[in-house]
């Protein structure tokens, strides 16, 4: 079974009026998943941008996994968001 966990940015809902809400998947590495499960994620400087028709999140901070090895992930890097093509076209428009 797939485990889905909703992440909310409470400060965004406080500071802005949210008109549309989308549910998207995100491409993550194994150590990133483990850090998120430990609650070590921050949206403070994160934003989304389009690159060649794909939607990416930039500035999302996911702390390095405490039990990671040399294969641990980089804390801040671009991560691809997964949405349906019609949703991507609607957002980009």
Image (tube, rainbow, N blue to C red):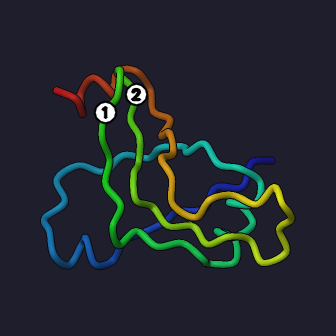
Q: Residues within 10 Å of mark 1 (few under 14, many from 20)?
A: few
Separation of disc 1 and disc 2 at Cα?
5 Å
Place of residue 4 in the rendered image (x, y in percent of width and height, measured from the top left): 64, 55
Answer left or right for 42 relative to 92: right
Relative vertical location of residue 76 with respect to residue 21 in this rendering, above or below: below
Place of residue 74 in the rendered image (x, y in percent of width and height, measured from the top left): 62, 59
Answer left or right for 12 relative to 34: left
Please state which of residues 30 and 8 is positioned toward the viewer in this rendering. 30
Please state which of residues 65 and 16 is positioned toward the viewer in this rendering. 65
Residue identifier under label 2? 54
Answer left or right for 73 relative to 20: right
Mark 2: secondary structure: strand
Mark 1: secondary structure: strand
Answer left or right for 5 relative to 7: right
Q: Which mark is residue 50?
A: 1
Q: State the residue at coordinates (61%, 78%).
A: 39
Relative vertical location of residue 51 with respect to residue 34 in this rendering, above or below: above
Q: Residues within 10 Å of mark 2 (few under 14, many from 20)?
A: some
Place of residue 90 in the rendered image (x, y in percent of width and height, measured from the top left): 24, 27
Q: State the residue at coordinates (31%, 55%).
A: 47
Quarter holding residue 63 = bottom right
Q: State the residue at coordinates (31%, 33%).
A: 50
Place of residue 60 in the rendered image (x, y in percent of width and height, measured from the top left): 45, 61
Total labels drawn: 2
Asked if the residue under mark 2 is in contact with the one under mark 1, i.e. CB atoms within 8 Å, the reply is yes
Quarter holding residue 85 = top left
Q: Which mark is residue 70?
A: none
């Amino acid at each position: 079974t797939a485990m889905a966990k909703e992440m909310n940015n409470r400060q965004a809902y406080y500071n802005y009026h949210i008109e549309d809400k989308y549910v998207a998947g995100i491409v993550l590495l194994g150590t990133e998943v483990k850090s998120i499960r430990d609650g070590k994620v921050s949206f403070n400087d994160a934003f989304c941008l389009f690159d060649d028709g794909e939607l990416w999140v930039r500035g999302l901070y996911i702390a390095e996994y405490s039990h990671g090895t040399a294969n641990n992930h980089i804390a801040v890097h671009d991560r691809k968001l997964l949405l349906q093509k019609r949703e991507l076209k609607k957002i980009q428009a």
